[in-house]
Image (spheres, grey):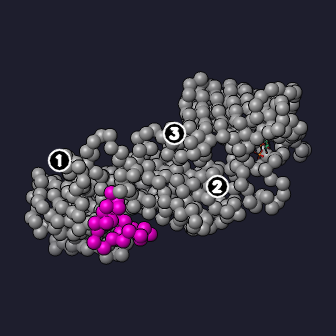
Amino acid sequence: MPIRALNPRVVARIAAGEVVDRPASVVKELVENSLDAGSSQISVEVKSGGVSLIQVTDNGSGIPSGEIGLAFDRYATSKVANLEDLESIRSLGFRGEALPSIAAVAQVDMVSCATDEKAGTYLSLQDGVISGQGSRGRSQGTTVTVNNLFRKIPARLKFLKSVATENSHIANVVSQYALAFPEVKFSLLIDGRAALRTPGSGRLIDSIAEVYGNDIAGNMIELNTDTAAPLPRISGMVGSPKVSRSGRGYLSFFVNRRWVNSRMLAKAVEDAYHGLLMVGKHPVAVINISLPPQEVDVNIHPTKSEVKFRNDSAIFGAVQRTVRRALTEQVTVPRVEVAATQPVFPSEVRETTLLSYAGASSGSITSTSTLTPAMSLPVLRVLGQLDNSYIIAEGPDGLYLIDQHAAHERILFEKIRQQRSQREVEIQGLLEPMTFEVSPRQEAILKSRYQDLAEFGFAIEPFGDRTFLIRALPALIHDKDWAGMLRELLDSLSRGDKSDWAEGVTITMACHGAVRAGQSLADAEMRELLRQLEQCATPHTCPHGRPTMIHLSSSQLKREFGRT
Ligand code: ADP
Ligand code: MG
């Protein structure tokens, strides 16, 4: 075939493929347009996974009747005018591609009424060509109706997943924007069923309750945002470590309110949870990053779902610090619930934090920038042991019950991590090397992990035929069932990258090295354990994220005894 320029309809369809790859991307573009138009109410309705119908109705600024046809021209936009504008984009749209792209692959009707216009205008397009136009009454705002998406592109249709999957992508898009714009009232109807309805109250927690449910909403911690501080400003909410999830689907990031995907931001948040979540668990987070538009390039991807920061590491650091600070300030001793009607979160928890501050001998209330003071325990006095499993102690504000195993796990976890990072692991050499036999699968893993294990104090070498020689062990576990522990490690940690692996080894070693429940402890041992717990950066949870202690405050005790 000779080279020739493609006709405009072919060009339009090829280009549309970049912007509109599935029904959810149509929803995303239309919702973004409604948000750019300043709407306070956006209703989305879809049928059959969005293939037979997608309709988005808003009460935004509308399109003047003289411009409605132009809106469907490629690269026609009201949002940028010149090159300088492109450097500082504040709107969600700017490429002028969405409407023509959608019109190229579906049948589209638009009815819009702009501010100050008496009547609305409608426009119908078939295969990207205007097929009807006229006036139609409606109140201010815009309705876009998309029918028969991809009907003329069987290849695209074939690549769509089940209706349920396409619906879930659509629900996710609307949910994300509902989280990004709590002041906007969103509703989503899927095949006639209300899938989402947010109140538009302007409070993020209300949107979170609608999108994720009350269980998660009741366990969210607000990021403490200093609105006077220079940009970037990090705001939003993160889940307490109690509500971890097994996937990354509960991490939402908005850059100047644009929903973006970013591995870098996900990593920053996960780093902030280091040691607070079990291996393989992921946090819940809704995070807004505000920064001058010049500091971020939003024009690197046709769907605008990825961005490039001018200074990646500054953003990474800001997100990680802000989340970590919120967690360390708020992860506090769980209170014994006296009456079910008492609100527990979030004011109660904040109060608890302050009480333990006030009680701490050296903690400083104003210093929130460092980790230790916020998390530190008050000085505790051992009263005794309960059930050979719990240490009973008295603090400045009431009674503490400490889970001896969980607390010791936390102590060892931090110790191992510190020793390893400083390359000062305590090692116990063996007078006689011992042999260690493994299964074929365990052998394969062990062979690839000599070096990683050496960092923890294991000196292991092959001895042939699924047998290994152990010449030294971490001092912490040399007198424990290290062989059982090693096997457990090899079984559970076969997958994952090096950082996950190291975390897993640390947790397993801490767990095996820690005193067990049921073990009787002498007074001096309990005192020593509490003293070491006080030194921990995050003493209130074990490495698996479970609480190490329960606190019953003096005022709760008084209430219980009817003395208030
Ligand atoms: P972009 O959003 O990049 O400008 P689009 O193709 O999505 O490009 O939209 C083209 C233009 O149509 C927009 O710039 C805007 O002026 C107008 N428009 C589209 N949707 C709406 C809406 N819901 N309300 C008001 N104006 C709209
Ligand atoms: Mg747009």
Query: Which of disc 3 and disc 1 is earlier in sequence?
Result: 3
The residue located at (80%, 39%) in the rendering is 115
Task: Report whether 246 appears left or right of 225.
Answer: left
Residue bearing the label numbered 1:
561
* Residue 554: quarter of image: bottom left
The mark tally for this picture is 3
Residue bearing the label numbered 3:
211
Q: Is residue 555 above or below residue 455?
A: above
The residue located at (89%, 38%) in the rendering is 66
Residue placed most toward the observer, 182 or 130: 182
Task: Report whether 523 appears left or right of 418.
Answer: left
State the mark number for residue 325.
Answer: none
Quadrant in which the N terminus is drawn = top right
Q: Position of residue 235 (x, y in %)?
A: 54, 56
Tell me if the residue at label 1 has its CB under 8 Å from ligand 1: no
Residue type, numbered disc 1 = Phe
Q: Position of residue 54 (x, y in %)?
A: 68, 30
Residue bearing the label numbered 2:
256
The residue located at (70%, 49%) in the rendering is 92
Instruction: Spot the residue most to the front.
Output: 564
Q: Nearer the viewer, mark 1 or mark 2?
A: 1
Task: Give the structural element (helix, strand or loop) at label 3.
Answer: helix
Task: Report whether 89 appears left or right of 165.
Answer: right
Segment tinted magenta in the rendering: 352-376
Q: Residues within 10 Å of mark 2 (few under 14, many from 20)?
A: many
Residue type, numbered disc 2 = Asn
Residue type, numbered disc 3 = Val
